[in-house]
Amino acid sequence: MSVLSKPYFHDEAAAFEFVESILWARGPVCPHCGCMGRISAIKPNPEKRVRIGLKKCGDCKKQFTVRIGTIFEESKLPLTKWLQAIFLMCSSKKGVSAHQLHRTLEVTYKTAWFLAHRIREAMRSGDLNPFGMGGATVEVDETFIGNDPDADPPKPGKPRGVRQMMKVVSLVERETGRARSVVIDHYSAGDVAYVVNQNLHREAHLLTDESKFYTRVGRHFASHNTVNHSAGEYVNRQDATIHTNTIEGYFSIFKRGMKGVYQHASKKHLHRYLAEFDFRYSMRAALGVNDQQRANEALRGVVGKRLTYRRIDQRPQA
Ligand SMILES: [Zn+2]
């Protein structure tokens, strides 16, 4: 036996049952009218083209499966392959390339690419609550990656610098271990301060490096302490809790993943890769989350990530 021998990775009916148990923990919900009772299962019958997992609502008489209203709705791929892909992406610390998914799942590269991006959407946290509530400690820093197609070229005679790369501001809350990353357009105090103000609670204890970008915005929070990286200081000499080593650790996983696994990300998709790394980091093994729990959490996120005509209050509760 291994994790990969679980029936829902191989048997479509088992896959439906598993997805239903996660998305419909309180019983099936009709995506057409929002009804929760009076839902009956229709026995699958390939001869009459009755699909696996088909349900009928006793209220509105319409039929549906658990795929409706989720990232699974727009694809014909069996749920077993979706579950395999979700598990692979959730259990690999630095991610899984579309090429690898293409080979392992035996789907086309195009399908694998599509799958991976839909799963990144499922991993995207809908949590807009600021970090640092209740006086939590938040490390904030910037990182740079690849090429920013919108950036001005370097001044004549000057080499390419961080301004010509894509720019990311990330926050890590020490108490919960959560990470959140945002792509910014300009390497400026304005863009950095905007992200900090949007994502940090006034009660937060902010920790950054000595960058001037944080000086002004840092005054809005309970405290703001810095380490002077350019002077070779990585932990504050007076207070060993003042450092940004947690966020540096996060960036190193992100960079190893982006270089080693994904190799190239366009600016258009960078926020999706960041959502993937934020998700895994926020639910990492060191926080007591195992691969299965992480995969189940991603699965809960498949709902409502697709734009549909349905009203939000009619979506199944996950
Ligand atoms: Zn209904």
Image: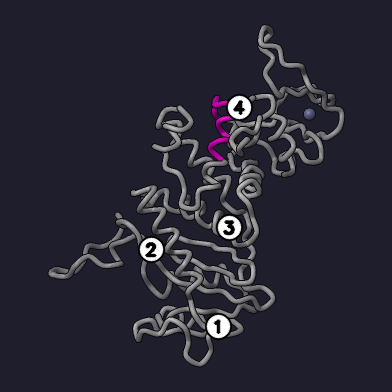
Q: Residue furthest front?
A: 1
Give the percent coordinates (x, y) of residue 204.
61, 77
Quarter holding the N terminus is top right
Q: Nearer the viewer, residue 27 or 126?
A: 27
- Name the mark on residue 284: 3
Mark 3 to mark 2 CA distance (whole Å): 24 Å
The numbered disc on residue 167 is 2
In the figure, is residue 195 to the left or right of 176?
left
Residue occupied by mark 4: 10
Q: Element type at marker 1?
A: loop
Which residue is pictured at 69% across the width and 14% down the height?
50
First-in-chain label (3 vs 4): 4
- Confirm or reject: label 4 Cβ below 8 Å from ligand 1: no
Q: What distance separates the C-alpha of mark 4 from that of mark 1?
A: 48 Å
Q: Position of residue 292 (x, y in %)?
A: 64, 46
The circle drawn on residue 241 is 1
* Some atom of ligand 1 lies within 8 Å of the CB belonging to the residue at label 1: no
Residue at horizontal 42 percent and vertical 39 percent from the top: 98
Query: Quick one: 253 or 228, which is closer to the camera?
Result: 253
Mark 1 / mark 3, whichever is N-terminal: 1
Q: Which residue is most to the right?
A: 38
Query: What span is in magenta?
Result: 75-86
